[in-house]
Image (spheres, grey):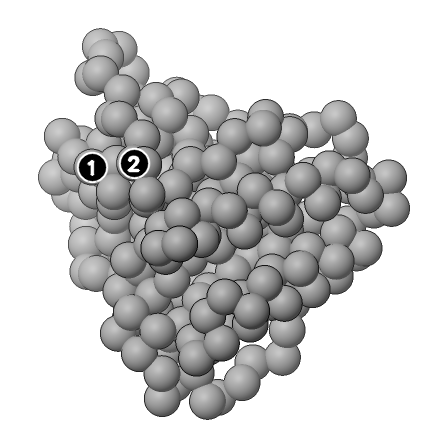
């Protein structure tokens, strides 16, 4: 099985597990999904390193070219509030710092978007730009961007769900500031890039992964025809 389809298979397996144990709550979901993913990666890609939100960081990953970066349950709070659907599972492979394969499972929708079969970019539409934002804590930077673009807001839960909203044509832009980690964005960025979307930091610089400090505070995923205007607006803010 190639890396693309391995990512998709594992994301789906973890999502199925999470659906089956959802009544046990978010902490159990984080723990059991992480155990499944790390075990399956050890079986399938024993020579690769793993960086997971739910496991202690092993500095040995810094000496590896191939590193799997996983978020076993993206949106623990949303997962713990059934029947909410806006949570995800992220499984990605970074090679020499670049996300080359990835999958984002949306288990409550029985859907896995992945780089082995990249989604087709939705047709461009007229009307206001739609920006995916947090349901609970839209940062000042993103609020100012929404205002600068005269955009409408699309409130959603987890980072993966917001990113996939752009991939699926539900939103046009996902901009984040204020703090994330590599596991929050690696798989969504891999899928978004494979679908033909623009992906970068908010200043337009490339996203790099498997760094000594996995903190990766900001992110931009948007339709390619909007990239210049979004980046220009960000530079003015």
Secondary structure of the residue carrying tag 1 is: loop
Q: Which residue is mark 2?
A: 118
Density class for disc 2 (Cα within 10 Å; few <14, some 14-19, many ≥20) is some
Q: Which residue lies most toward the front here?
A: 1
Q: Which residue is mark 1?
A: 196
Left or right side of 134 for 234 = left
Please provide percent x and percent y for residue 45.
46, 70
Quarter-of-image position of residue 110: top right
Q: Is residue 199 above or below residue 123?
A: below
Residue sitting at x 64%, y 30%: 108
Instruction: Quote the CA–CA distance across marks 2 and 1.
Output: 9 Å
Residue sitting at x 21%, y 61%: 206
Please provide percent x and percent y for residue 37.
60, 60
Mark 2 touches mark 1? (CB < 8 Å)? yes
Q: Nearer the viewer, residue 198 or 133?
A: 198
Left or right side of 197 for 137 = right
Q: Is residue 206 above or below residue 10?
A: below
Q: Tell which tag, 2 or 1, sits nearer the viewer.
A: 2
Secondary structure of the residue carrying tag 2 is: loop
**Which of the two labelled residues, at mark 2 and mark 1, occupies the earlier sequence position?**
2
């Amino acid at each position: 099985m190639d890396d693309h389809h391995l990512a998709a298979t594992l994301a789906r397996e973890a999502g199925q597990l999470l659906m089956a144990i959802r009544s046990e709550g978010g902490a159990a979901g984080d723990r059991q999904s992480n155990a499944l993913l790390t075990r399956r990666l050890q079986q399938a890609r024993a020579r690769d390193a793993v960086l997971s939100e739910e496991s202690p960081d092993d500095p040995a990953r810094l000496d590896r070219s191939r590193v799997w970066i996983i978020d076993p349950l993206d949106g623990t709070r949303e997962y713990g509030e059934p029947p909410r659907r806006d949570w995800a599972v992220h499984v990605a492979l970074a090679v020499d710092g670049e996300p080359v394969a990835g999958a984002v499972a949306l288990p409550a929708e029985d859907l896995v978007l992945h780089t082995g079969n990249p989604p087709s970019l939705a047709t461009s539409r007229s009307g206001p730009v739609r920006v995916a934002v947090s349901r609970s804590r839209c940062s000042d930077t993103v609020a100012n961007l929404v205002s600068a673009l005269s955009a409408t807001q699309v409130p959603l839960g987890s980072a993966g769900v917001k990113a996939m909203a752009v991939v699926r044509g539900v939103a046009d832009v996902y901009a984040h500031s204020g703090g994330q980690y590599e596991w929050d964005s690696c798989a969504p960025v891999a899928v978004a890039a494979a679908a033909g979307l623009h992906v970068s930091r908010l200043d337009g610089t490339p996203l790099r992964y498997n760094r000594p400090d996995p903190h990766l505070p900001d992110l931009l995923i948007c339709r390619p025809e909007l990239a210049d205007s979004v980046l220009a607006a960000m530079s003015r803010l």
